[in-house]
Amino acid sequence: MGDPTDSPAAIRIDMGEEAAGSPEGAAAFLSSLPAPLDGYGRDALPAEGGGVPPAAAADRIDALEVSVRTRLLELASDLLGAGDDGGGAADAGGGGGGRLLEYLRAAMALCVHLVSAAERLDAIDRADGEGGGGTDALPGCYRGMGSPAARKLPFLLLEDTVDSLPPALLQALWTAGVPDCGLSVLVVNLCASPSFTKASRFVLLKACNKLLRKLSNRDRDAAFAGEVMTLLSTVFPLSERSAVNVLGTFNVTNVTECEDEETFLGHRNLGADAGATDGMEVEDGSSSAPAEADGNGGGVDYAFYSIFWGVHKVFTDPTVLMAPAAGKPGEKAGAEAAAFDGVRAEAFIGDVRTVLAVLEGQPFTAEEIRQSKSR
């Protein structure tokens, strides 16, 4: 493959595990890389017999990292300088965006190739020591190239991309409008490779958290934020320590004051709740609208109002579900008396189902969605 082009097909570079199987495959893989990656690869894997001993593997990996990351930042700068940081984000899959995606995919493939070849060479060396061995041994320059620094480099490239581009461009590059070419697909393919350890993936977690913090308008960017979190859920198990509230701490200062029934009905009769749901059906089939006509065309009754904000209280401090059933509502149990209250938990789950059933039965209007996105 020659210089990067704007063609999306140029982005389709296979990951380099298979190319690491033989000297011929390794040489062909390096030649297939786009410039200047092919040169970076040859510098990291100097030919033997040149009269000058190659530098240590760690030094060659450090030099490769500097070169690869510098080139990525140059491409990101070109993309921003071309005016694609705002209105042109929709076309990020082509032009400068296409070149950046092609470079990312090729750079990740190079890292996979280095690590896979180093692992294969180590296996051949072990087999030789046990009296086995193979005849297709790779060049000795691959020894030591499977270090943690090489395994982490693809994720550092992703973090550099997140740091250097605005959210609009990142969202466009996430799928790029081309199958198997977006950032999300590159990450999933990379994490599927067994050569990349769990420790390296924490850089991915850091990069995705940075991206989520960039999405200031969670209403407008909710779908994109959901895609990012879905990606994390496919890479990390639910038992991942970073996804667990290890200390069991909660923001109990976030207190929502609920109205009493008299105040609630007074506000509703004054039209304060105009536009609220009208005659919605809850899970048990009963109507959430008040039985009496109040001149306001129905609306949410006080029972559903109490259920909705009661659920919020439990989400704010789930430890209330550990209080004994005989305790006062919302009372925290002491350490010696703490026990899971199945009755209270079952009631909470029923309330959550009621809220979800009401919300699903009364979708937001187009005007409500438009107002939400414009905030």
Image (spheres, rainbow, N blue to C red):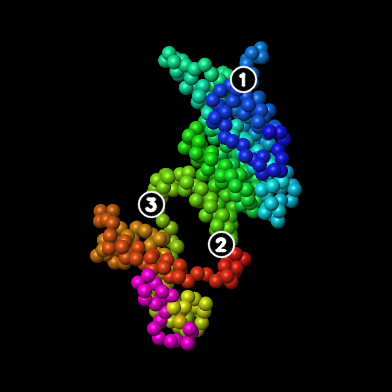
Label 3 SS: loop
Classify the position of the C terminus by image quarter: bottom right
Question: Marks 2/1: CA distance?
Answer: 52 Å
Magenta run includes residue 39 = no
Query: Can you give x and y, in whole percent of width and height, for residue 341 in the image?
Result: 28, 59
Q: Which residue is mark 3?
A: 248
Residue 253's place in the image compared with 61, above or below, is below
Residue 254 occupies quadrant? bottom left
Q: Which residue is mark 1?
A: 55
Q: Residues within 10 Å of mark 1 (few under 14, many from 20)?
A: few
Q: Along the polypeptide, which appears first: circle 2 or circle 1?
A: 1
Where does the magenta region start and end?
280-297
Q: Residues within 10 Å of mark 2 (few under 14, many from 20)?
A: some
Residue occupying the point 34% across, 58% down = 319
Q: Residue furthest right?
A: 82
The circle drawn on residue 219 is 2
Q: Main secondary structure of the magenta part?
A: loop
Question: Marks 1/3: CA distance?
Answer: 50 Å
Q: Answer with left or right where residue 247 lies relative to residue 168.
A: left
What's the amino acid at mark 1?
A: Ala
Query: Can you give x and y, in whole percent of width and height, for residue 11 in the image?
Result: 64, 40
Circle 1/circle 3 CB separation < 8 Å: no
Q: Along the polypeptide, which appears first: circle 1 or circle 3?
A: 1
